[in-house]
Amino acid sequence: MRETIIKNLLFLIIVCAGTACSNSKQLFGGERLFTGSIVHIEGKEIGKKELKILKNDLAGLVRPKPNSKTLGLRLKLTLYNLAGDTKKKKGLRQWFSNKVGEPPVLIKVVTLNNNKELMVNFLENRGYFNAKVTAKFDLGLNKKSSALFTVETGPQYKIKEVIFKKDTTLVMNVIDSNFNETLLKPGSVYNLDVIKGERIRIDRMLKESGFFYFQPDYIVVVVDSSIGDHKVNMYVRLKQKDIPPEAYQRYYINDVFIYANYRLSSKKNDTSKDNKIFVDGYCIIDKNGDFKPKVFSEIMVFNKGDIYSLDNQNTSLSRLVNIGNFKFVKNRFETVGPSLLDVYYYLTPFPNKSLRFEAGANTQNDNRAGTKGSVSWRHRNVFKGAEEFLFKLSGGFEAQYSGPVKQPTIYNFGAETNLSFPRFMVPFYSVKTISRNMPRTVMKLKYNFESSAKLINISSYSAAFGYNWHQGAHTEHQFYPINFTYVNTDTVGSPENLGILYGNLVFNGIIIGPTYEYTYTSQVGPSRMHSFYFNGRIDLSGNILGLVQKADYETNPQKLFGSTYAQYLKMQPDFRYYLRLSPATIIASRIVLGIGIPYGNSMAMPNIKQFWAGGNSDLRGFPSRLVGPGSFNEFDSANSRRYIQTLGDMKLEINLELRQNLYKWLNAGIFAEAGNIWQYRADANFPGGQFTSSFYKELAADIGAGLRFDFKILILRLDIGMPIRKPWMAEGQRWVTDKIAFADPDWKKKNLIFNIAIGYPF
């Protein structure tokens, strides 16, 4: 199976590469392939950085765009040509040609004059008022042609003075009072986008000051370029003849009406104000009594008597949406006097109770596979204060269906309850926040049982209390000051008889201490060229307790409730960077650090808190959870005994992946990865596993490629990886690229790792 897939992939790559250079040979008569545009700019006063940006911007204006490239090849055009010409409206060839492939973009459809006008208009908007553009075709070889544009920019005009035309209106007084915040700065270059941005800034500022009916179109910026010396004066004023009287008026919030049971599906929506209840200045209409009125005074930001604010409006809507109880949320404003607004919120709730079943399969890249399923019951409004209660049962198993070393079948069962409140619940304090997302106070109870057939049974009981909250659209915090976990491990088999070692998985005791997690992402909103993601987690256990008891695992081991407790400091930063080269091409990179320091009452960290390497979303060219620690050799050892998994207290991992869209739902990826795990202290069972200053010499590395099938509801990922550096080999022999032998069945069996997974690895 794997060999067939690899052969087909290699064959497709060879065919595409071999035919890519002959795309133009498919053209007939005088047809020529349009290969793109070249922009030459003549402007001595333009700096190198500005010149580069300007070239890219001008080249991006040219229409139509040439055939897209993947890794330097016009892959879609190649696939179109391979499919051949077909007159059928249906069929595989037609689908492959027109859906997956891309027809050639010919030079005859490129209109130079239209593109010249686009460039001149763009340059004028950037302050090059005297720009000139000439264009011609470069008739190259092999029936290929490009468009050459020569641009004479002339001097770029700059802003000399910005004058806000004052008048007697309150609106203009408010604008003038914020003059220092203007985006139009003397000495800056003329830019139409900045002018548009200034109008939006003024409009936003006015809406924050109560001018509900004002619009950006009511502002005009008059530009005078006749003052000489390639400078302009800008006059910002109001379009007084176009502005309605209400736009000059500052508005205040009068009454806030909240319909808590608004039904979109009913033939006649009930918007009457009967049975209303006033709580903290809000008028609540909840005919079914589903919610405690107090919950809305905690959510809403608008208050009676406040000046209207667009930010308060958006915050209130966002909080109502993100609380998770309402399927639809909308609002409207109604003028009820010369300067008053009534606000109406119409909320359509979700059903309070829901039952959910989930079933699926999972696979590891060392021939292990299994099934998993769960059933959960949720109540979204258990105490009528928008509290959410969840009870969940889950279970599954994982078995190894092939491979030279038989691993035990693993069974898993779990039960958990979560109760969350849409507010900060702090003893003796009342905390109110006005962030866009409502904070949540969370209580958790969980039990998990895991059994490795004929080896060990692990039972764990945990409880937690903490808070989740957002800080703006990009940042999230999770702080759990109370975390308690009790683990009990029963050994039910002899490792000597079964040929499997599991001593590193045995932990009996208590883990107690706070955790804090910080997440930042810039991936909110439209696609960006540069995107960042950072997640950092701090996990502590037994720190204060161990300090008070002066615990030491060698000389003074201590217990809590009759059980040993773990004492450690653990930090795990995860940084990711995404570079979008084009709408269809992304370079994704990740660096993961794992730092675990056991001390005091612990020689090593508990296995459930340790790090591992190798797997579907880790080092994909190595078996799951069997890389390291350090230069330790487990799965290639002459000893027939095998660990279920190897773990470490420290970790370093670096991933790099090129992602390319091939078709709407089909994507390809090429990746390279390096990393390993280490132990904080030396362990005789894992020689070479301790972290030292030579850790970089013990990095494992792999490369590979794969396909991703993006079906929106899930992403199915198929990857093939292979090791190129094996840290357990002798120094000087760890790079194994010279030993790659695709024609050798034994080499492929030992080195090619096939991964099936759901979702992207990072």
Image (cartoon, rainbow, N blue to C red):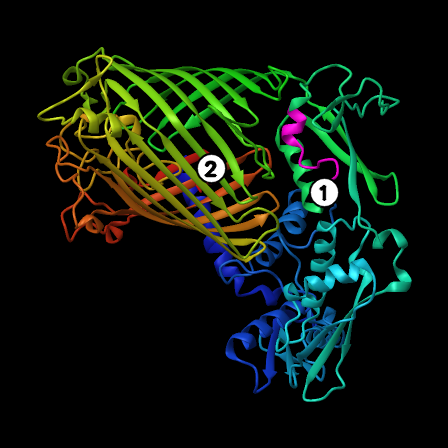
* Quadrant in the picture for the N terminus: top left
Q: Quadrant of residue 55?
A: bottom right
Identified by mark 1, the residue type is Lys
Q: Is residue 28 above or below residue 486?
A: below
Residue 469: image location, x then y, percent: 51, 35
Magenta span includes 302: yes
What residue would you read off at disc 1? Answer: 90
Q: At which x and y percent is residue 588? A: 45, 50
Residue depicted at 75% across the width and 75% down the height = 117
Residue type at mark 2: give it: His
Q: Residue at x 26, y 42 (%)?
A: 676
The answer to whether marks 1 and 2 mark residues whose Cβ atoms lie closer than 8 Å is no
Q: Position of residue 173 (x, y in %)?
A: 76, 62
> Relative to 334, is 411 on the left or the right?
left
Stretch of the chain drawn in magenta: 295-305
The crowd level at tag 2 (other Cα within 10 Å; few <14, some 14-19, many 20+) is some
Give the farthest residue toward the left: 555
The answer to if 66 sits in the magenta stretch is no
Left or right for 411, reference 381? left
Looking at marks 1 and 2 on the same chain, the residue that comes earlier in the sequence is marked by: 1
Name the residue that disc number 2 marks.
477
> On the rendered image, what quadrant is the C terminus found in?
top left
Name, please, the residue furthest toward the top.
Answer: 492
Depth check: give the residue in front, 347 or 452: 347
Residue at 55%, 28% in the rendered image: 423
Secondary structure at numbered mark 2: strand
The kind of secondary structure element at disc 1 is loop
Drawn side of residue 179 relative to residue 21, left or right: right
Instruction: Let me know if residue 206 appears in the view.
Output: yes
The answer to which of 153 and 473 lies nearer the viewer is 473
Residue 404 visible here: no
**Percent coordinates x, y for residue 658 in the rendering:** 46, 52
